[in-house]
Image (cartoon, helix red, strand yellow):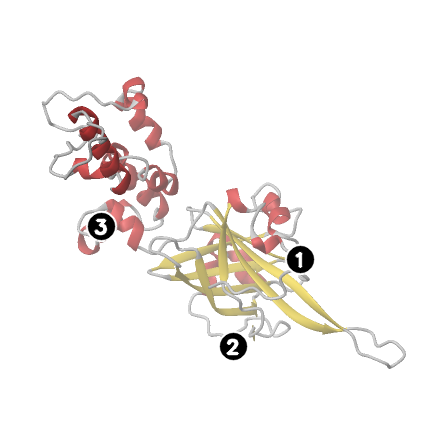
Amino acid sequence: MTSDFALSVPPELESASRLRTVQFLITKRPWLDLYGKRVRPVAPFGSASSKPFVDPALIHRCLPDELLFEVFARMSPYSLGRAACVCRKWRYTIRNPVFWRTVCLKAWQLYGPVENYKILHSRYEGSWRKMWILRPRVRTDGLYVSRNTYIRTGVAEWKVHNPVHLVCYFRYIRFFPSGRFLYKNSSQKVKDVVKCMNFRASKAENVFSGRYTLSDDKVEAAVLYPGLRPTVLRIRLRLRGTTAGANNRMDLLSLVTSGVNDNEINGHDNDDLLGVVEGWQDDETHNPDVPAVSHKRGMSPFVFVPFEEVETSVLNLPVEKMDYFVPG
């Protein structure tokens, strides 16, 4: 039996109240409205499709595809990889093999175009982008740095305690696509050494130039130390990466110093130094005054530091803040 004092609620207000209750209890999920709807893919640059398409993005309406293509053509490979994450159209455009063919031929120019094309079709199914990611290569957009430490005994004071010092020094290598590289041993930090790792300032900053060859993931390099007793530094390295295509680590397999004759130096150019020491054993020397030494210390792996990160790299930290560094 209903009460005589019950208020009569209009049907419009009752339905509105019920709708508010449902909206309060149920969470809104706008992405559920996309189920069952087909999203039209964006046609890449140079597509043969004849269907008219109006791009809703403002940058695509203001910037023609031809200019966008020219912008991508002037970007570095790693910048292209970041730009491919922006949107679907950029990803499709950047997959154009023209971009990756140019950077691949420049990275492996020592092999020549014919050999690179043979490797492309025999190992990487004709994909320049796949070749760039999977094939080992030395990076030329930064420095490879090896941080080494050792303990040196200090001067004893009043024979009460024997102090020790932790000494830190670095090996720096900068590679060039032409087969040349620069090498420097120094206790200076990365941000200070990067200024002199070029051919103009190399002579004044004790930076030595040499030649290298790349075979799969193995790097053979040689540097000549001039002087009264010329010495050749032979370096064997192995490339690897923390991720696919990174090539940001190099393991130091061997480091050997040997003496050379004056006739060998005078009869060959410094660019042909690898040809002079080719086939030498680790204990072989051509100058009895300079014995061959195979170094076992200071063999820490090289870590790659891009030029845009030299100021913020952790390798700039002093010894008291980072006494030991694990390259990974």
Judging by the rendered image, the residue that carries numbered circle 2 is: 283
Image location (x, y in percent) of residue 123: 21, 56
Q: CA distance from mark 3 to mark 2?
A: 39 Å
- Please tell me in which quadrant of the rendered image residue 261 appears: bottom right
Above or below residue 327? Residue 104 is: above
Judging by the rendered image, the residue that carries numbered circle 1 is: 318
Residue drawn at (69%, 68%) of the image = 166
Q: Is residue 95 visible?
A: no
Q: CA distance from mark 3 to mark 1?
A: 45 Å
- Please tell me in which quadrant of the rendered image residue 299 appears: bottom right
Q: Earlier in the sequence, mark 3 or mark 2?
A: 3
Judging by the rendered image, the residue that carries numbered circle 3 is: 120
The three-letter code of the residue at mark 3 reads: Leu
Above or below residue 110? Residue 76 is: above
Q: In the image, which is nearer the foreground, mark 1 or mark 2?
A: 1
Q: How many C-alpha atoms fall within 10 Å of the one at disc 2: few (<14), some, or many (≥20)?
A: few
**Residue furthest out toward the bottom:** 159
